[in-house]
C-alpha cells in the first residue's frame, strides 16, 4: 500500500469516526437513555475517540512527513510543512485541548468546584470537537482529491 493511499485511508477513517460519534452516536444516546446514563455513555465514547485520535494523529504525522519529504526531495516543490500536516496538527490540538485539558475541568465543575460552569466548559469542549470534525473532513477531502 502506498503512503498516499494509507494517508487517504487513515484520514477518512478518522473523519468518519469523529462524525459518527458526534453526529449519530452521542445524540442517539440522549434520545433513548436517561440524561445521566446518556452522559456516562457519551463520556465513554468521547474517551475512546480521544485515545483513537492520539493514535491516528501520530500515524498520520509520520506518514505525512514521509510524503511531504519525498515530494520535496523529488523537486516537486513545496516544503516538508504541508497543508495536510498542518490539518493533522490542528486536529491533534483540538483533541488535546477539547478533551484532555477541558475534561478534568468539567469533572471539577460537575462537583461544584472550579472557576467555570459545566455548561461553559461543555460548550467549549463541543466547539473543539466540531472544529476537529471540520478539519478532519477537509483533511480527508484533500487527501482523497488527488
Image: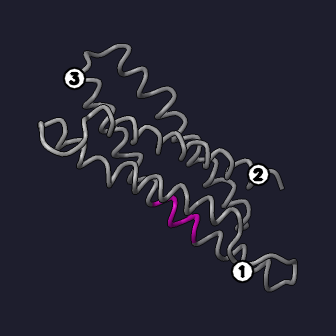
Query: What is the distance, in whole Å, between disc 1 and disc 3 at their CAs?
Result: 48 Å
**Which quarter of the picture shows residue 71?**
bottom right
Query: What is the distance, in whole Å, between disc 3 and disc 2 at their CAs?
Result: 40 Å
Tag 1 secondary structure:
helix
Query: What is the distance, in whole Å, between disc 1 and disc 2 at their CAs?
Result: 19 Å
Residue 36 point in image, percent of width and height? 22, 23
In the image, 80 versus 21, the foreground residue is 80
Residue 32 point in image, percent of width and height? 35, 13
Would residue 31 appear left or right of 5 to someone viewing this image? left
Looking at the rendered image, the quarter that the N terminus falls into is bottom right
Q: Which mark is residue 36?
A: 3
In the image, 25 versus 115, the foreground residue is 115
Q: How busy is the neighbourhood of tag 1: few (under 14 within 10 Å), some, or many (20 plus)?
A: some
Q: Residue under circle 2?
A: 144
Q: Could you tell me what secondary structure mostly forms the magenta stretch? A: helix
Q: Which mark is residue 37?
A: none
Tag 3 secondary structure:
helix
Q: How busy is the neighbourhood of tag 2: few (under 14 within 10 Å), some, or many (20 plus)?
A: some
Q: Nearer the viewer, mark 3 or mark 2?
A: 3
**Residue at the spot x=87%, y=77% of the render?**
76
Tag 2 secondary structure:
helix
- Range covered by the magenta-colored residues: 55-61
Q: Which mark is residue 69?
A: 1
Would residue 27 appear left or right of 130 to someone viewing this image? left
Residue 133 point in image, percent of width and height? 56, 42
**Residue at the spot x=62%, y=58% of the render?**
87
Amino acid at each position: 500500500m502506498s503512503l498516499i493511499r494509507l494517508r487517504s485511508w487513515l484520514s477518512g477513517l478518522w473523519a468518519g469516526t469523529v462524525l459518527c460519534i458526534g453526529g449519530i452516536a452521542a445524540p442517539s444516546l440522549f434520545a433513548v437513555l436517561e440524561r445521566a446514563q446518556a452522559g456516562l455513555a457519551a463520556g465513554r465514547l468521547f474517551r475512546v475517540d480521544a485515545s483513537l485520535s492520539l493514535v491516528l494523529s501520530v500515524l498520520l504525522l509520520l506518514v505525512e512527513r514521509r510524503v511531504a519529504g519525498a515530494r520535496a526531495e523529488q523537486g516537486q516543490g513545496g516544503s516538508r510543512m504541508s497543508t495536510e500536516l498542518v490539518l493533522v496538527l490542528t486536529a491533534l490540538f483540538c483533541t488535546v485541548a477539547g478533551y484532555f485539558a477541558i475534561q478534568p475541568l468539567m469533572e471539577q465543575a460537575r462537583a461544584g468546584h472550579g472557576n467555570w460552569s459545566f455548561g461553559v466548559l461543555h460548550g467549549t469542549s463541543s466547539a473543539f470537537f466540531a472544529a476537529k470534525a471540520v478539519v478532519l473532513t477537509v483533511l480527508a477531502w484533500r487527501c482523497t482529491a488527488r
